[in-house]
Amino acid sequence: MVCALSLATASLTACGSDKVVTVKTIPVERSIPKQDGPRPLNIASPKYMVITKDNFELYRDKLMSGAMVIVGMSQEDYKLLLKNQAEYCRYIEQQKAIIVFYESNLIDPIPVPTPKGT
């Protein structure tokens, strides 16, 4: 109640004054620092071998000595693995394009129009 009364009093006293309030708009340059990119990937490629009944004997000695293990996967699952890898690559490329777009707008900001008469 006291707050509303004081605001009403302030507005009544300001109405009777001859002071002119001038509002001036000034464009402000933004200063957003460009961040460094992430550390590059360091991924080693595994060696894939296709072992069938026709070439099993070639890998048998390595398998029996413990120098090699067999990880099984169906052909359909292998195709799914390849499709997933392609999907990861597509997603990363799209994210890189978004990053490039925003970084280029930070480097070359859109000019702010200046008011006429200044």
Image: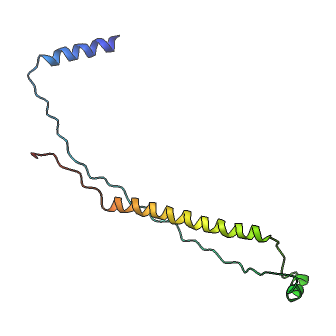
Compared to 63, does 86 lie above or below?
above
Foreground residue, 73 or 104? 73
Find residue 81 and report its horizontal and vertical position in percent. Answer: 70, 68
Tell me if 58 is positioned left or right of 91 in this view.
right
Find residue 69 and report its horizontal and vertical position in percent. Answer: 84, 77
The structure residue drawn at horizontal position 82% and vertical position 72%, both measured from the top left corner, is: 72
Instruction: Name the image quarter holding residue 43.
Output: bottom right
Instruction: Name the image quarter holding residue 40.
Output: bottom right
Compared to 65, does 117 lie above or below?
above
Compared to 11, does 51 lie above or below?
below
The structure residue drawn at horizontal position 47% and vertical position 65%, both measured from the top left corner, is: 37
Foreground residue, 92 or 54? 54
Find residue 102 and report its horizontal and vertical position in percent. Answer: 40, 59
Q: How many marks?
A: 0
Tell me if 101 is positioned left or right of 84 in this view.
left
Instruction: Name the image quarter holding residue 7.
Output: top left
Colour convention of the picture: rainbow
The structure residue drawn at horizontal position 53% and vertical position 69%, both measured from the top left corner, is: 39
Find residue 26 and report its horizontal and vertical position in percent. Answer: 20, 45
Foreground residue, 83 or 15? 83
The structure residue drawn at horizontal position 55% and vertical position 65%, both measured from the top left corner, is: 90
Residue at the far right: name it: 64
Tell me if 20 is positioned left or right of 113 in this view.
left
Image quarter (top left, top right, bottom left or bottom right) of the N terminus: top left
